[in-house]
Image (cartoon, rainbow, N blue to C red):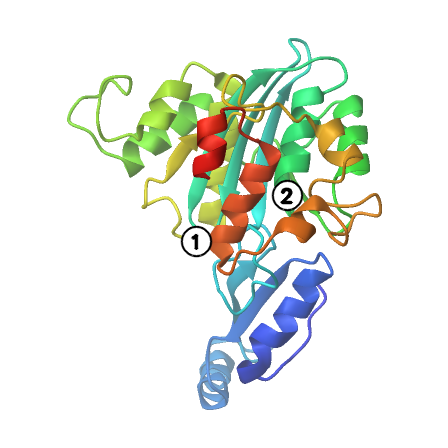
Amino acid sequence: MSMVGVPEMSFNFWAAKFLAKGYKVGRVDQAETALGAEMRRTADKGAKIGGAVDKIVRRELNKVYTNGTLVDSDLLADDEAGHCVSIREDEENNTFGICVLDSSTSQFDLSSFEDDVCRTKLETVMRQLRPKEIIYTKGNLSVTTTRLFKSVLDSSCLWTNLRPSEGFRYNETVDQLKEMFPDDDDAMYEGQGVPEAIREMLGHKDAIEALGAMIWYVKSWRYDLLSMKNFNIYDPMKEGKGLILDGQTLAHIEVLVNSEGTAEGSLSSLLGRCVTPFGKRLFRLWLCMPLRDVEQIAQR
């Protein structure tokens, strides 16, 4: 793989630059000193007669950074949530299961829905979240869905393609959840160890498998984001709770971004006066799902 050496003090500065370009960045540290390497080579010479001796100082992959899994504040380029979205598609039944990770707050949102041929709900999800990384299994996404992603997602969005052997299937995911959230009662539907949002979604295979892929991915990068039990159910349309703004509406009236894909001149940039990153994220949600009740509007 391509490698570049940078001073340890400026690692975050250079890593942020590569991440902004849409690359994955792996941090590789020396696993031994030059003296240790010399001692190892001396020992190897005694063990190997006539064989090749490894003269390079050993290095190990310490951690992998992607835009969708950043937790270090020094690497976050802006105040927007760096959403990482895991998706499973059942093309035959036209259903989708998604798991959304906001790594900055360790929040996991699960959703399962049946969509129309135009992928209205899926487009709404992608325009609301504007993910920085999507995770999918090779061969799982249909041609229609792939075309939608290419037209909706930002060019810097990282597409992570898992092999069929990677990620967890439904039963494997359930076993992982039982191991992570042990419970006195083995029945996950009744126990209190597993978060309530997960228990409610157990009947939706696609959503649980999307969660399984996300768990596998997070564990492989050595991030501890699951212990906080911050799991919720995500409803992209929020039917009955506010005005429904689907993906096409969000795009046409430029709620979050303009027609060129930037925030300049959008409703969010004109109205946004929030100071903290938490406030800015909350305000984004408010814009995507406006209230309809007069009293609630006045209170807000």
Q: Position of residue 272 (x, y in %)?
A: 60, 52
> Would you place residue 70 above or below residue 58 in this image?
above
Q: Which residue is mark 2?
A: 131
Q: Which mark is residue 272?
A: none
**Residue furthest out toward the left:** 184
> Split into 4 quadrants, where in the image is the N terminus?
bottom right
> Callout 1: 10 Å neighbours few (<14), some, many (20+)?
some
Q: Position of residue 182 (x, y in %)?
A: 22, 33
| Marks 1 and 2, how far apart at CA | 19 Å
Q: Amino acid at mark 1?
A: Tyr
Helix, strand or loop for disc 1: loop
Foreground: 185 or 277?
277
Foreground: 131 or 280?
280
Q: Position of residue 215 (x, y in %)?
A: 45, 39
Q: Amino acid at mark 2?
A: Pro
Of the two numbered discs 1 and 2 on the same chain, state the one appearing first in sequence: 2
Residue 260 in view of the camera:
yes
Q: Image point 68% across, 69% down: which residue?
A: 17
Q: Which mark is residue 223?
A: 1
Q: Image point 76% across, 28% down: which residue?
A: 248
**Residue furthest out toward the bottom:** 35
| Left or right placement of residue 45 versus residue 192 in this view | right
> Would you place residue 10 above or below residue 96 in this image?
below
Residue 52 in view of the camera:
no
Res 200 → quadrant: top left
Foreground: 264 or 18?
264
**Residue furthest out toward the top:** 93
Q: Image point 37% across, 44% down: which residue?
A: 226
| Left or right placement of residue 23 versus residue 277 in this view | right
> Would you place residue 22 above or below residue 127 in this image?
below
